[in-house]
Image (cartoon, rainbow, N blue to C red):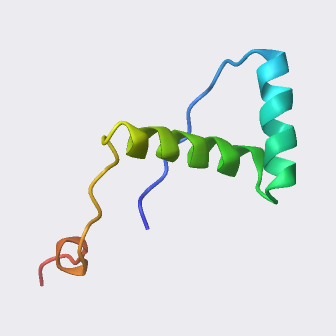
Amino acid sequence: MAKKKAFALRINEEMLKAIEKWAADEFRSTNGQIEWMLMQSLKNAKRAPKKRTDDTQQTPD
């Protein structure tokens, strides 16, 4: 699993309410919904991060 990094996000109150509602409808946390939305946008723009293979995740002995 990829390492996650925390950062502050300033967002319009009405937009946040809409995202919270959407998240609840999808049984996700607000944070999970925002991550999902961002990933969908990256995929649509063909800019999604490349998936790593098991070989690249292992550390050398």
Residue 56 to residue 54: above or below: above
Residue at the extreme top: 12
Residue 29 to residue 8: above or below: below
Residue at the extreme front: 44
Q: Position of residue 13 (x, y in %)?
A: 83, 18
Quadrant of the image occupied by residue 12: top right
The residue depicted at 31 percent of the width and 42 percent of the height is 46
Judged left or right of residue 23, residue 3 is left
The residue depicted at 31 percent of the width and 50 percent of the height is 49
Residue 7 to residue 21: above or below: above
Q: Can you say which quadrant of the picture contains the N terminus?
A: bottom left
The residue depicted at 48 percent of the width and 46 percent of the height is 39
Q: Can you say which quadrant of the picture contains the C terminus?
A: bottom left
Judged left or right of residue 38, residue 11 is right
Residue at the extreme bottom: 61
Q: Position of residue 6 (x, y in %)?
A: 56, 40
